[in-house]
């Protein structure tokens, strides 16, 4: 039996059908990626599974073995520390600890313990260790550190953290819980790349099941083995990660279209026969026409139009003026707030037409650096300048630089009415999916994705030749991200982009600048090239460490080898001397045994004396041989 079964689910709001006929199952070990455009109903489906909302039709089956864990919309801002807040997920283990302490106190106070108390103590002890009591504190700490918190932040009160940081704390609790079916809604939000990679490792090794809603294609490819896509009110399921799902869906759409067109052609052919039979006007012709019409109607009943491509944004960035070759030059830039340094020694040279990505951990100063280049902040020290004819435009990730009372139309119109006609503004808004009454919506009512589209439209209309982009794919669904990527790929200007979207980096990057507290490190190519370069760098560092360690022992090893070589030489000399003496002794013994020696008394005595002397020498040679062999074995460590 699957852990979770969803069967023929339908959900509608007023007259809009969100989805219908949605069915899928989640088995033990399934790592499911859940994709779809913003607003298609993914989060609503999660709420229905959790019992926080109700479906209009269909049913949900949850196995008795399923323990579902999910992230909540609102997060606690209690005054307990981050570490204690996360540790509370192990409340049961902490209660066992208290109970064991109480039993130990009772035994100590009584001086003895009855069998019942000892049995209870043993049972609690077994339960404690079976459920991870020996490691839960260490696991809590390593999980928080893996998600990007620092040692100092573990002690900070929860109410001092931002909403994004509290969401990370909630994610830590969820990952540490004993749930075996996780529902994760955009878990990579607010995480930097190193934290996302830690989460990828955790989820890839996770023995339970999960469904993860995400627009991060790189992340989905790393952690999922099954994909479900909600599109045009229908659900499509594939075995494999996101990239495999796209391949399979493309093939399926092609087959569906072929079948659809074939059926349409067959219907047209049959209805042509029907028309012809009716024109002939005989009784048997009408019978044939009726029969053929029924045949055509049966085919029409099975006719399903293939899915259409969802509406997507149509970007087109174009720089109105060509800049000089040197677009952005920075020398020794540094920034500190209240005396606390954020970064220093930033040197940068960006040439015309380059697509440069600025990566680094949260808090390293990437956004601050972009704000300096955009003229919104002043550097503490150092300098920078923009090249000849460079016109920059800045996209900020916070999406706060607007009047919330403005409508969508006036947010754009108020800035460009002197250069762009009302009709062209409306056409541009339509290209960004703002149509009809949508253009009169106040900005305060827009979702994050809608605000991002307004900001991107304003950026497009600037026709700047230097784009400073801070997390431009945040809030965008996959279709919109792909449209943005295509537009940036064709852009004829220069770009400096801060992002955690590794898919975007892989597709566009000419260079990556990795930001550290002491400056920038440069890597050529996309994100995979960057990872390969880091791996090579790490290998070189390990090799250097090995060389450094061995260098200290080099002279000793050389001396040791010299001793071994001398011992080998001594052993070889002993072996040769023994062989020579044995050969001479064998010759003497043969001569002594000959008739000539037997008949010559003096000669026999002389040969016997020489043989005795040789035996004595041979005995000494045997001992030297043994000593040389033992010495070599000792030196060689055998």
Image (cartoon, rainbow, N blue to C red):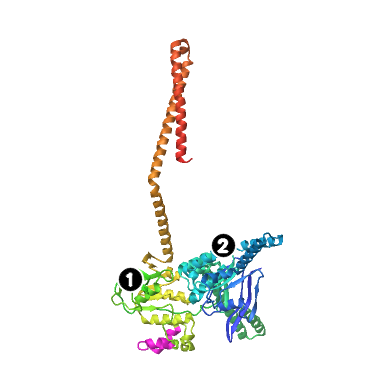
What is the x, y in percent for residue 72?
56, 76
The residue labelled by disc 1 is: 333
Please say if the residues under marks 2 and 1 sit with CB atoms less than 8 Å apart: no
Point 37% across, 65% down: residue: 521
Observer-side mark, 2 or 1, equals 2
Q: Quadrant of residue 207?
A: bottom right
**Disc 2 element:** loop
Q: Position of residue 420 (x, y in %)?
A: 37, 87
Residue 68 to residue 570: above or below: below
Does 316 appear above or below 506? Answer: below
Task: Give the labeled residue for mark 2.
Answer: 135
The CA span between labels 2 and 1 is 45 Å
Can you give x and y, in whole percent of width and height, for residue 36 in the image? 53, 76
| Magenta residues (range) | 409-430
Between 222 and 487, the residue placed more toward the observer is 222
Q: Quadrant of the N terminus?
A: bottom right
Judging depth in this view, the residue of 444 and 119 nearest the camera is 119
Q: Main secondary structure of the magenta part?
A: helix
Q: Secondary structure at mark 1?
A: strand
The answer to if 631 sits in the magenta stretch is: no
Residue at 47%, 10% (x, y): give it: 599
Q: Residues within 10 Å of mark 1 (few under 14, many from 20)?
A: many
Residue 357 in view of the camera: yes
- The one nearer the camera, 77 or 195, is 77
Q: Position of residue 42 (x, y in %)?
A: 56, 77
Left or right: 26 as drawn, with respect to 604 = right
């Amino acid at each position: 039996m699957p852990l979770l079964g969803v069967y023929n689910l339908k959900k509608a709001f007023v007259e809009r059908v969100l989805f219908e006929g949605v069915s899928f199952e989640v088995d033990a070990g399934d790592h499911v990626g859940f994709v779809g455009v913003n607003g298609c109903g993914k989060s609503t489906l999660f709420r229905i599974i959790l019992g926080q909302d109700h479906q209009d039709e269909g049913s949900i089956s949850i196995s008795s073995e399923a323990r579902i864990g999910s992230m909540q919309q609102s997060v606690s801002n209690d005054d307990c520390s981050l570490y204690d807040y996360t540790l509370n997920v192990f409340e049961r283990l902490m209660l066992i600890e208290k109970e064991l302490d109480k039993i130990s106190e009772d035994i100590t106070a009584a001086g003895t313990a009855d069998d019942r108390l000892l049995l209870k103590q043993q049972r609690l002890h077994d339960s404690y260790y079976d459920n991870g009591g020996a490691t839960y504190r260490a696991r809590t700490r390593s999980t928080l550190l893996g998600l990007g918190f620092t040692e100092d932040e573990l002690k900070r009160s929860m109410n001092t953290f931002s909403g994004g940081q509290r969401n990370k704390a909630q994610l830590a609790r969820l990952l540490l819980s004993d749930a075996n079916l996780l529902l994760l809604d955009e878990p990579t939000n607010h995480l930097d790349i190193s934290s996302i990679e830690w989460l990828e490792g955790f989820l890839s090794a996770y023995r339970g099941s999960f469904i993860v809603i995400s627009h991060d294609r790189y992340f989905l490819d790393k952690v999922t083995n099954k994909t479900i896509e909600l599109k045009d009110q229908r659900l499509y399921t594939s075995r494999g990660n996101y990239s495999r799902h796209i391949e399979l869906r493309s093939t399926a759409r092609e087959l569906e279209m072929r079948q659809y067109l074939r059926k349409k052609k067959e219907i047209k052919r049959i209805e042509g026969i029907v028309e012809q039979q009716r024109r002939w006007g005989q009784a048997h012709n009408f019978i044939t026409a009726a029969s053929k019409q029924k045949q055509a109607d049966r085919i029409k009943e099975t006719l399903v139009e293939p899915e259409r491509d969802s509406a997507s944004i149509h970007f087109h960035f174009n720089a109105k003026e060509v800049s000089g070759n040197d677009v952005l030059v920075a020398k020794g830039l540094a920034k500190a707030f209240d005396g606390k340094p954020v970064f220093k020694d930033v040197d940068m040279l960006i040439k015309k037409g380059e697509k440069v990505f600025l990566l680094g951990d949260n808090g390293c100063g990437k956004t601050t650096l972009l704000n300096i280049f955009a003229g919104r902040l002043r550097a503490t020290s150092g300098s920078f300048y923009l090249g000849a004819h460079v016109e920059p435009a800045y996209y900020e990730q916070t999406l706060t630089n607007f009047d919330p009372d403005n409508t969508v139309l006036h947010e754009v119109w108020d800035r460009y009415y002197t250069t762009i006609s009302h009709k062209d503004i409306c056409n541009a808004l339509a290209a960004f999916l703002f149509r009809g009454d949508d253009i009169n919506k106040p900005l305060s009512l827009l979702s994050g994705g809608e605000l991002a589209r307004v900001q991107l439209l304003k950026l497009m209309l600037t026709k700047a030749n230097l784009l400073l982009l801070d997390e431009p794919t945040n809030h965008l669904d996959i279709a919109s991200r792909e449209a943005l990527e295509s537009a940036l790929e064709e852009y004829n200007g220069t770009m400096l982009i801060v992002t955690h979207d590794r898919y975007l980096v892989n597709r566009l990057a000419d260079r990556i600048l990795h930001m550290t507290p002491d400056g920038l490190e440069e890597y050529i190519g996309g994100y995979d090239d960057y990872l390969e370069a880091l791996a090579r760098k790490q290998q070189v560092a390990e090799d250097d460490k090995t060389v450094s360690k061995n260098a200290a022992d080099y002279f000793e090893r050389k001396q040791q080898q010299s001793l071994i070589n001398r011992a080998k030489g001594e052993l070889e000399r002993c072996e040769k001397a023994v062989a020579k003496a044995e050969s001479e002794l064998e010759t003497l013994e043969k001569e002594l045994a000959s008739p000539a020696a037997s008949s010559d008394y003096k000669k026999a005595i002389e040969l016997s004396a020489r043989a005795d002397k040789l035996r004595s020498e041979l005995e000494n040679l045997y001992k030297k041989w043994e000593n040389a062999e033992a010495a070599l074995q000792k030196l060689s460590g055998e």
